Image (cartoon, coloured by chain):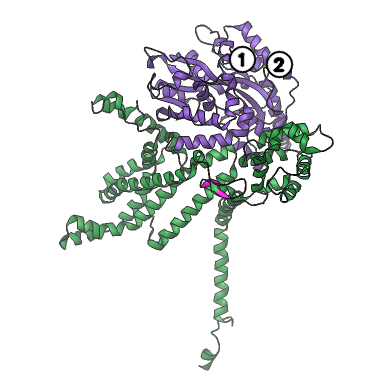
Amino acid sequence: MNETTTGSILTTEGVPLKVSLQKAEKRNKIRAILLVAPLLVFILVTFLIPIGDMLLRSVDDSYINTVFPKTFKEYKKWDRQDLPSEELYKTMFFEVKDSEGYAIGKASTRMNYAKSGWKSLLKKSKRKFKKIEEGPYKEQMIAIDKKWADMEYWKALGVMVDATTAGYYLNAVDLKYNVDKEIVRQKENRRIYNHTWIKTFKVSVLVMIFCLMLGYPISYLLSTLPLKYSNLLMICVLLPFWTSLLVRTVAWMVMLQQKGVFNNLLVMANVIADENRFKLMYNETATIIVMTQILLPFMVLPLYSVMKTISPNYMRAALNLGASPLHAFWKVYMPNSVPGISAGCMLVFILAIGYYITPELVGGKDGQMVGNWIAYHLKTTLNWGLSAALGAILLGVLTVLYWVYNKLVGIENIKLG
Amino acid sequence: MFKLIKATFLGLIAMAFTASSYADITFVSWGGAYTNSQQKAYVDTWSKGSGVTVENYNGGLGEIKAQVEAGNVTWDVVDVLPDQAITGCDEGLFAKVDQSSFLDDLVVAPVSDCVVPQIFWAYTAFYSKSAFPGKKPKNIKDFFNVKKFPGKRGIHTWANALIEMALVADGVKASKVYEVMSTPEGIDRAFAKLDTIKDHVVFWSAGSKPLELVSSGEVVMSLAYNGRIGAAILSEGKDFEYIWDATVLEQEYLVAIKGGNEKEALEFMAHASTAQALADQAKYIPYGPMRKSSIDIIKKGEPWFIKEGGNIDILPHMPTHPKVLKRAVIADPVWWADNGAEVSERFGAWKGN
């Protein structure tokens, strides 16, 4: 009897039970890890590494430092009052002249973001410097192009001398470094991003609200109708969901444009005059209408799956006990469907905030969202740093919203089915 | 039996090797009537053993840069605009090309060492005759005059050519446009002019869209690539009319992407830039060849444009026709390589606010 209280319990092999259990558990753990390993690797490679790369790019300014290391070292000694000394001109001269391959081309693209004009200046200089054999260099450089005597160009270099920069983030919220590296507001006629951020949130929230308003009754109907009808209705929800996004977007163009089906019908029915056709296409209204239709299934499906589990007995009980239908719905049914509402709203909002192709096609001049600017800088201006900063801010905002949501509602209250 | 299997097997391996020694290439261009003309003029006639896959894109160097940086190049030959040709060549995205065979035959000097010539094209204003039964718009001033010619205007979503056209509409001489644009006041002036039509514009980004907008009556006038307008008039019999004023003449080049199948790409580009190939393209779309000798071939061959029931004279539809050229702005790709990013941001702010 004493053995069991003083020593540990042994298995039949004589190993303490605790050790044996730990062993078995460890084996299970390894097996579990092996099973999820492919997924982990997949997420790492396709998700975490690219996002990490994006975050790095949004602050990285190191390339330019590898092209002009000596110039930047010399640059830090410059007093920024008068034109730089012969010494700085000379280091710049040799680093441009002796650079190999495409270094100058790539560097000049970066320098052109700080001050427009660097690009052609460096290209021209690279070509002409070959003929210059000996100093003094300052006069000869200015003779090649008088931009070399422009303080603005020299001052603009100052924002690039560090290997990391907050410049892209500043750009993404309509601020910038001036030539003295102080943070100032972007020139008024170049302020685009704050306006776009507000618009992106406005459109996403509106789309979410409209999806909820339209999706809630449909889901209710779906979950209460007899199977035979609800299946048909479900197909009506799913069929557009399965149709290509582009096809649906283009179909809306045909419907909504000024000489389109909708306006033509209204004119034919004499509801509106021919010259006051509604402007429903190529503006913000179009973006909201089309996105609502496209994202509706993402609201209906989670709502439906939650409503399906709400027993009709609850409502019956509430009505039996004397509640008015509205009161019963508000106090009994609605709270039960909150997990579905949360899931639907989250899904729709997160998808909407990063939307790109629909605003591009139907948004016209005032329906463009942040995603369109990210694509624009990726594809056209090649300013990937700015694209990365815009993307990182979007990611940051979503993370904060998620955190707030978790505090307020609790993430465990989300239900997809 | 075993020997037979072995022989077939070895034969198959050998075949695989001979086939792969000449790689297939992917040729990327802008789609629509333009790609169609390239397909007929030199893709279909390419018989060097490698297949050519044709893909479409909407311009920009983003995809190309991504492919080169990732070391996974799937595009081999791309049809690019001149400012992209400059930037891409400077940044090492494109392979260098031996230009000796055509250098003396070109109308203008090539913008970089990485290109072979294609065509001149122009941003051109046009309208549908049915939209203006009475007085018809004649010049770019009319395009910017919504009082005289009410109705919406179709314009593209980027700033190139719009700045130039706005300035000409504001009274600047076509030859002085870039001088004015190089001053901050000049850009202000262009935007002030754009403001006058701001509430009346519909934007497009794909080249086929303006034709659709004008056909459906969604806009009364639009800017478009002249070749698309011409192809619609000539092949489809649309009742479009050009406004041959302040057209902005642009160049178009082919480049080979570095790290792709460069050898095949360069051979294909040589084939695609012969005087005959460029002239043949004009059988299907009214863009102006960049080689002088191509124009000679067309002149001798007129009526050149292929149409069922009788070919049509193509030279009057070209943006390089002397009458058109007299009133045109010759686009300056160097100005845009320098100032494009800044002006584009301002244009974006103009669109959005």
| Three-letter code, disc 2 | Asp
Q: Is residue B136 above or below residue A241?
A: above
> Which residue is more in the foreground, A244 or B10?
A244
Q: Is residue B134 left or right of residue B341?
A: left
For label 2, count other residues whose C-alpha is less than 10 Å away and answer few (under 14), some (14-19) or many (20+).
some
Badge 1 marks a residue whose secondary structure is helix
Residue A395 rendering spot, x and y as whole percentages: 50, 52
Residue at 47%, 35% (x, y): give it: B350
Badge 2 marks a residue whose secondary structure is helix
Q: Is residue B24 left or right of residue A295?
A: right
Return the residue found at the far bottom: A2
Chain painted in purple in the figure: B
Q: Chain of mark 1?
A: B
Res A37 seen here: yes
The numbered mark at residue B105 is 2
Residue A225 rendering spot, x and y as whole percentages: 25, 48
Residue at 18%, 55% (x, y): give it: A325
Question: What range is drawn magenta here?
Answer: A171-183
The numbered mark at residue B280 is 1
